[in-house]
Image (cartoon, rainbow, N blue to C red):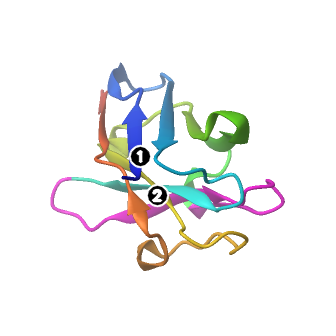
Amino acid sequence: QVQLIESGGGLVQAGGSLRLSCTASGRTFNRNSMGWFRQAPGKEREFVAARSWSGATTMYLDSLKGRFTISRDNAKNTVYLQMNNLETDDTAVYYCAAEHTAGVPPTAAASDYDYWGQGTQVTVSS
């Protein structure tokens, strides 16, 4: 059974930082694109960032460039999301996702991802 387990969420003041982790079990994703999405209350799920297995392709929501960084440790089957200078609008449940097929480039479309974590809550207070 494939599982993606997120961790690292929590409550932080505006301007603070958090680092999310997502570790996969049940199969390896060393050759698969992985990404992060988020969903705020009353809003649709939105793309945050994605990265190919090699790191050759990295994508971000434009408004998050410079504040968020996605990285991977393929040996640990883990993807990270470093979030700096957090804003209250960043409050959401953050989900990691992985593509089933190896070698497929990352995309910003949630429908392209086959595996999803349960999400971790990030709350940014003013």
Dot 1 or dot 2, earlier in sequence = 1
Question: Is 83 in front, or is 73?
Answer: 73
The quarter of the picture where residue 43 lies is bottom left
Residue at 39 percent across and 39 percent down: it is 5
Give the class, few, some or many, for how many residues have Cα within 10 Å of label 2's Cα (few <14, many ≥20): many
Q: Badge 1, how many Cα within 10 Å: few under 14, some, many 20+?
A: many
Report the mark closest to the observer, 1 or 2: 1
In magenta segment, residue 74? no
Image location of residue 71, percent across then percent down: 68, 41
- What residue is rendered at 70% in x and 42% in y? 74
Q: Is residue 9 above or below residue 109?
A: above
Q: Nearer the viewer, residue 40 or 56?
A: 56
Judging by the rendered image, the residue that carries numbered circle 2 is 97
Q: Quadrant of the C terminus?
A: top left
Q: Give amino acid for label 1.
A: Leu
Q: Position of residue 96 (x, y in %)?
A: 44, 51
Task: Report x, y in % for residue 54.
Answer: 81, 55
**Residue 81, image x and y in percent?**
56, 39
Please identify the quarter of the rendering in which residue 107 is found. Answer: bottom right
**Of the residues shown, which amino acid type is indicated by label 2?**
Ala
Q: Which residue is mark 1?
A: 4
- The answer to whether residue 122 is left or right of residue 21 is left
Residue range highlighted in magenta: 41-62
- Quick check: 74 left or right of 118? right
In the displayed structure image, the side of residue 123 where residue 34 appears, left or right: right
Observer-nearest of 76 and 123: 76
Q: Is residue 54 magenta?
A: yes
**How many labels were placed on the picture?**
2
